Image (tube, rainbow, N blue to C red):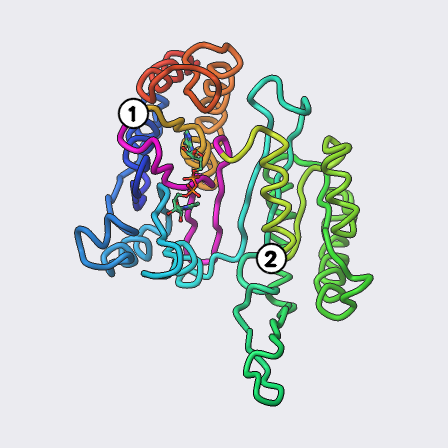
Amino acid sequence: MATACTLIPGDGIGPDITEATLAILEAAGASFDWDRQVAGAAGVEQKGTPMPDETIESIKRTRLALKGPLETPVGEGYRSVNVALRQTFDLYANVRPARDIVPGGRYDGVDIVLIRENTEGLYAGLEHYIRVGDDPQAAAESIALITRVGSDRVIRYAFEYALRHGRKKVTLVHKANILKYSQGLFRSVGQKIAKEYDGKVTYDERIVDACAMQLVIDPLKLDVIVTTNLFGDILSDLVSGLVGGLGMAPGANIGRDAAIFEAVHGTAPDIAGKGVANPSALLLAACLMLDHIGDRFRADRIRRAIESTIRGGEALTRDLGGTATTREFTEAVIKRLA
Ligand code: NAD
């Protein structure tokens, strides 16, 4: 039976990479009942708002969305739709797998999944200025809010993810040596949950600065990483950089009531409408979505086809050093679906 899914093609290169992704999903036999919706600049253009109610209602109904990049104006204009979606659906876990597919990168064999707490920590939005004398902005305070419930759900998700995907180890990344209360709470929740998975998933811990160094020196030692919001934000781009940058990076935002899958890159305005964008990141996000709904078989099939197309070196898009168009890359992947 077809799975109902909200589809937001997005802005800039979004529509091109979305069509490529749909063609490959169909060729692989994945069956979705797409509910096409708009957001971002397309939402403003067609419905007068970057986040139309119909789009929210659709995601509430399907609980699943595949989303192209959305334009967010810097400074003026509407606030980030991505942040609004995260808040509306309480998408507490951001999942960023990084696996080296593009040959000639810094390392061979990197295969890391970084799971970032996505709703609290230093990004909880609890900030204010402090007046001293006649200076209303003499100081500023941002509160890093860590809760037991928030820590529990994301760390538990990381262990369940490890189990489901046959991974061996979860590394909790923290700074509890300095932030003894907030980071200490996150760490102690991790230690408690780790006991429940004893014998099934190995648990270890790293202090964030040491982890950053290890990621650069010896990334093959890391498997699944779970960490708080700010550290996750920084480390997830670091791991993308280890495997060839954002062009190949998919992301998943997991909540209790919905899950939204997307490419990590933006709308690429410099190449929009030229038919030369690389659709791999959105396609890999669609594979994460297939994993999420339990269709590992097709997800792996598509991942193998992307990998062999790229490793084969033909039909590479410009960002990967080739000259192929989005369409040529798409056809090459479809041919390689085994
Ligand atoms: P960007 O990721 O759009 O582009 C950075 C560079 O990478 C550009 O040179 C672009 O051509 C290239 N690139 C990106 N994706 C590519 C692809 N699939 N194939 C080939 N080349 C690719 O970043 P930016 O220019 O900083 O942002 C542009 C817009 O996208 C902004 O409005 C920003 O707010 C938005 N954005 C949205 C999301 C999202 O919706 N998740 C994420 C990041 C940025």
Q: Residues within 10 Å of mark 1 (few under 14, many from 20)?
A: some
Instruction: Verify whether residue 287 appears in magenta.
Output: no
Q: Tell me the residue at 64%/46% (across/down).
A: 235
User: What amino acid does circle 2 point to?
Assistant: Asn
User: What amino acid does circle 1 point to?
Assistant: Gly
Q: Earlier in the sequence, mark 1 or mark 2?
A: 2
Q: Is residue 299 left or right of residue 268?
A: right
Q: Is residue 218 left or right of residue 59?
A: right
Q: Is residue 6 left or right of residue 152?
A: left
Q: Tell me the residue at 55%/33% (across/down).
A: 245
Between marks 1 and 2, how big is the CA–CA gap?
A: 35 Å
Along the viewing direction, whichever of 309 and 169 lies nearer the viewer:
309
In the picture of the structure, the residue carrying the numbered disc 2 is 229
Q: Tell me the residue at 41%/41% (across/down).
A: 266
Along the viewing direction, whichever of 139 and 218 lies nearer the viewer:
139
Task: Report the magenta residues as a range.
Answer: 247-275
Viewer-nearest of labels 1 and 2? 1
Q: Is residue 286 left or right of residue 171?
A: left
Instruction: Verify whether residue 252 appears in magenta.
Output: yes
Residue 111 drawn above or below residue 181: above
- Secondary structure type for disc 2: helix
Whole-percent x, y for residue 136 in the image = 54, 83
Q: Quadrant of residue 84?
A: bottom left
In the picture of the structure, the residue carrying the numbered disc 1 is 275
Whole-percent x, y for residue 226 in the image = 66, 50
